[in-house]
Image (cartoon, rainbow, N blue to C red):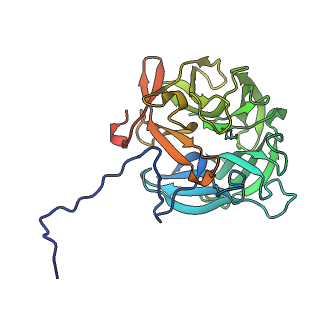
Amino acid sequence: MQTQNPATPVPVAEPCFVPGQVWNDTNGEPINAHGGGLLYHEGVYYWYGEFKIAEPEGNKAQVGVSCYSSSNLYHWGNEGIALPVSEDPHHDLARGCILERPKVLFNRATGKFVMWFHLELLGEGYQSARVGIAVSDSPTGPFAFRESFRPDGAMSRDLTLFVDDDAAAYLFTASEDNRTLHISRLTDDYLQTSGEHTQAFPGRYMEAPAVFRHGGRYWFVGSGCTGWAPNAARSAVADRPFGPWEELDNPCVGPDAETTFSAQSTYVLPVAGRPDTFLFLADRWTPDNPIEGRYVWLPITFTEGRFQIPWRDTWDLNESR
Ligand code: DGJ
């Protein structure tokens, strides 16, 4: 029998992000969490996303919202379906509805995990333009569906949630048939909009919003509105979540920067314990076979009065600033 020389170090691959490549979970299966959002809770990151299936109906919700967990952001364990679709064809979440861009917040006051997502009712194409709300006592679910509605009475498609340092939460959503972004403050329990709301970027057709706070300012990244086809990212800065928002230029730098590296934003993650480290999360959609969609995670760097998203073939958290 051959024995290994104990003096010979066994090569161990350092964990890293490989944007745009197949990303397997800890079971060796491709991660299936598209249009996702992340939550950091008690030392663990949770990744919620659209669970896609292969053709022909793969972009419609046939399963529900998936959840993965990780302690280091590189290795993700499958926690299963956090919010399943319903077998009742009259339910708002009837199998075959459109359920996109789930985002989850933890409400400290109520102890509840609250999920918001873009919902299109079964058979209505993209015309219902609603948000859906679901609640759980655990980050991995099961989430119980509560209701769907048009926030502040307005259309709502691509969306994100942002929580400020004072625990005030905001919905940023593509409204008015995507023409204008609407910003709504949520109620203290995060279950509804509060009635305080405003508009931003009128006539700019912004989708795929993501918002983060750095250096005392609020930063926005999003996309134009070209269906599943990629376009150049948009960015903006404000001194308050309600704005006014000053639009900046395309923050992407490197090959394919004009198409957001063939991807579309979905979330910006502030990394716990690293005040200057933010991850840009995007989806490389494959509408002909949605289950093949890939993830593009990149560092965010800050320069005078703006931020950038540089391309990396591979990278790890030690290089991000
Ligand atoms: C782009 C959006 O960002 C996606 O979430 C999805 O709604 C597609 N458009 C549908 O065409």
Relative to 233, 244 lies left or right: right
Give me the residue at 16% from left, 76% from top: 3
All told, the count of numbered labels is 0
Residue 139 in sight here = no
Above or below for 171 versus 12: above
Q: Is residue 236 visible?
A: yes
- Image coords of residue 165 (percent x, y): 56, 34
Q: Is residue 251 left or right of residue 33?
A: left
Can you give x and y, in whole percent of width and height, for residue 112 in the image? 66, 52
Which residue is at the far right? 90
Q: Is residue 293 left or right of residue 254?
A: right
Quadrant, the C terminus: top left
Quadrant of ligand 1: it is top right
Q: Position of residue 274 (x, y in %)?
A: 40, 38
Which residue, as the protein is rendered here, is positioned at the far bottom? 1
Quadrant in which residue 242 is drawn: top right
Q: Nearer the viewer, residue 107 or 285?
A: 285
Residue displayed at 82% across by 52% down: 122
Query: Where does the image place residue 40, in percent across and percent down from the top left?
Result: 52, 48
Q: Residue at x 47, y 53 (%)?
A: 23
Q: Quadrant of the N terminus?
A: bottom left
- Residue situated in front as seen by the camera: 192 or 249: 249
